Amino acid sequence: MTESHTPSGGSARLNTSVAHNARVWNYWIGGKDNYQVDQQVGERVATLFPVIRDIARADRDFLGRAVRYLAGERGVRQFLDIGTGLPTAENTHEIAQGIAPGSRIVYVDNDPIVLVHARTLLTGTSEGVTDYIDADVHDPDTILERAAQSLDFTRPVAVMMLGILNFVLDTGTARDIARRIMAAVPSGSFLVLTHPTFEADLGGEGQIPAMKFWNENATPPITARSRADIAAFFDGLQLLEPGLVSCAQWRAEPDSPAAVPQFGAVAVKP
């Protein structure tokens, strides 16, 4: 079963003259849903910070490992994917419903290009639910209200926040968003999160000039954070092994790619 709370007017916000994160990210991982301006900015960022493509791929691979682990080993049957971005291969619902066809997935984004592709995204199993809602991460109450139409908040939910809180520039606000969303889900729920960092031990110093260029030439503005600030998003939760690590190394195979300056972790709500 598929459902959509996608408004018909989403395309009115589409601006193809300014590079946008969802489209540039799509370009970095080899997708086709981007414009020349996205390619130009993406290439410039990659020149300033060559590891960015590795980060994009590592983040995507982390998503796959996390969803397979939660659906396959922890029995999670509900996923709230906030800031999903453009659909590619192995989206959250495809992985989860491939393991458990009755899984219920709600995607959240407010990018008009993603809205245009919502029908492509909404191709889940007949047994489960795959829903898409147009909402902004800065408005967690709206996200929760609309998601509750498809998810049962009396049962565990895996909240996916991959590469999204870095677009909430104020750290206190970002922490409050994570706290408010996790407060709405029951014990046994999970927070799955990735976030860019400038920590030197992960090679993150290059994030600073690259993000400065991005903020001057693309949208939405972005920030990197320290290990301590990112760890604070998990306050009150129990981090699963191996804890807060480079997303490339979270439960990865021994021959996995090198660490990238993007933290990743999964935590359970006690």
Image (cartoon, rainbow, N blue to C red):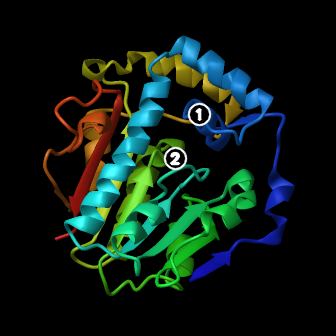
Using the rendered view, name the quadrant where residue 133 is placed. bottom right
Expressed as whole percent of the image width and height from the top left, the position of residue 259 reads 28, 26
Q: Label 2, on which residue?
A: 168
User: In the rendered view of the protein, which quadrant contains the N terminus?
Assistant: bottom right
Mark 1: secondary structure: loop
Residue at mark 1 to residue at mark 2: CA–CA distance: 26 Å
Residue 96 picture location, percent across and down: 38, 67
Q: Earlier in the sequence, mark 1 or mark 2?
A: 1
Q: Residues within 10 Å of mark 2 (few under 14, many from 20)?
A: some
- Would residue 137 appear left or right of 232 to someone viewing this image? right
Quadrant occupied by the C terminus: bottom left
Mark on residue 30?
1
Judge whether residue 193 can be spotted in this image: no
Q: Amino acid at mark 2?
A: Val
Say which of 123 and 28 sits in front: 123
Q: Secondary structure at mark 2?
A: loop
- Residue 98 lies left or right of residue 264; in this view the side is right
